[in-house]
Amino acid sequence: AQSVTQLGSHVSVSEGALVLLRCNYSSSVPPYLFWYVQYPNQGLQLLLKYTTGATLVKGINGFEAEFKKSETSFHLTKPSAHMSDAAEYFCAVSGQGGSEKLVFGKGTKLTVNP
Amino acid sequence: DAGVIQSPRHEVTEMGQEVTLRCKPISGHDYLFWYRQTMMRGLELLIYFNNNVPIDDSGMPEDRFSAKMPNASFSTLKIQPSEPRDSAVYFCASSYRLPSGYTFGSGTRLTVV
């Protein structure tokens, strides 16, 4: 069964600083990995995903994530935080060729300080 | 496309009442998912459908919860009778087969008093 651990339920950065949100997963089969963002009172929006191939994936709003199989990680980064990045971010995993279920982490709330 | 449409956006009901949440998935998506989000438990998958057929309902908390998908464009999640601990935000999502990812609706915030 798949599982996801997001280190840090709250992360605070200054505007213009690097954003790093951590995600580690466990999966018995090659994973599909996703990052979603949730703004207040809204549903989740897909930021980016890893399926196969290139391990560095780029998403919307300048975010990117790198799949590291040896570390079972899929950390989300953005070089320079913007005030509009303040939101909650969820990492999710699913196993290839198996169930269609996505298993979500508990989420990391990002605060961007002026 | 209007995206995944959920109704109502907010629902306040008294304990013991029946509650019905509604979802219209994106046309052409053949998977539909119901999730519940709370501060304590995060996002929990309740049930999902493929081509209108329930595939996995292992996340449905108890018999008070039921879900149906009578056709490809409509699904309901019903709670009868409702209890205060059911208070949460309920999300519907739809997708093509993975790895396309899900598209979520805006959610229904349920408060049971």
Image (cartoon, rainbow, N blue to C red):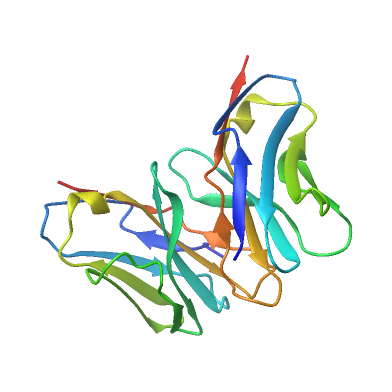
Q: Is residue A62 above or below residue B104?
A: above
Q: Position of residue B31 (x, y in %)?
A: 53, 75
Q: Could you tell me residue B33's position as x and y percent?
A: 47, 68
In the rendered image, the quadrant that contains the C terminus of chain A is top right
Residue at the (63%, 24%) spot, across then down: A83
Compared across the picture, whether B113 is left or right of B29 comes to left
**Where residue B107 sits in the image (x, y, percent)?**
40, 54
B113 to B90, vertically: above or below: above
Residue projecting furthest to the top: A114
Q: On screen, A69 above or below B62? A: above
> Residue shown at 70%/77% (left/top)?
A97
In the rendered image, which quarter is residue B90 located in? bottom left
Q: For this view, does A97 lie left or right of residue A70?
A: left
Left or right: B65 in relation to A40: left
Q: At x 16% / y 65%, what residue is drawn?
A: B18
Rendered view: A59 above or below A49: above
Quadrant position of the N terminus of chain A in the picture: bottom right
Residue A61 place in picture, x, y as percent: 72, 40
* Closer to us: B88 or B57: B57
